[in-house]
Image: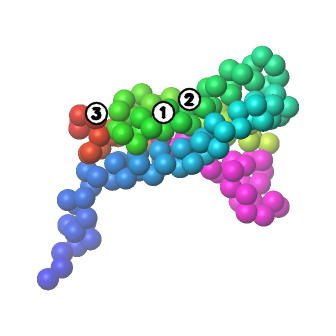
Amino acid sequence: MLGTLKDILKPYAPYAPTLLRWVTGIFLLAHGIPKLFHVPIFLDSIAQNIVGFPLNYIVGIGTLIVENLLAIFLILGFKVRESALFIACWFFGVSFVAHGANIIELFNLNSGDDQVKFEYPFLLAVNCLVLAIRGAGRLGFDPED
């Protein structure tokens, strides 16, 4: 006879942070890799919409590091707490600084189906905050807590 759902899923609980880590890292890479192929356009966009020259270079390089290098760290399970905390802080900033004007469109009632405005960076930040608190889980370079 089947046990309760808790009993069925309990053996897989140590792998939950691993799944969250992999999915978050892959989504970060999917968000960051296109920027690697269009760095000048990306830097110009930052200069026009967020901060001007020369700060656009700092923000741009930081974004490329966070969305690519630290995403790879998450996927591999290397320095997960540190990487995830840095990503969480970065994306909370992105949510409110770069996309904060769109917080009134939180449920996209006026703008169609465009989650990049606020929800996507905020969700990445919360995922990474959970990983910073919980740790890497199984199947990574970091030792299990």
Q: Which residue is mark 1?
A: 70
Badge 1 amino acid: Leu
Q: Is residue 131 magenta?
A: no
* x then y, percent, for residue 122: 61, 45
Helix, strand or loop at mark 2: helix
Q: CA distance from mark 3 to mark 1?
A: 14 Å
Badge 3 amino acid: Asp
CB within 8 Å, label 2 to label 1: yes
Instruction: Tell me what residue is drawn at x 54 percent, y 44 percent.
Output: 29
Q: Which mark is residue 94?
A: none
Question: How many other residues sit within 10 Å of disc 1, few (<14), some (14-19) or many (≥20)?
Answer: many
Q: Which residue is mark 2?
A: 65
Start and end of the magenta stretch?
102-128
Label 2 or label 1, whichever comes before in sequence order: 2
Question: How many other residues sit within 10 Å of disc 3, few (<14), some (14-19) or many (≥20)?
Answer: some
Viewer-closest of 139 and 20: 139
Viewer-closest of 117 and 61: 61
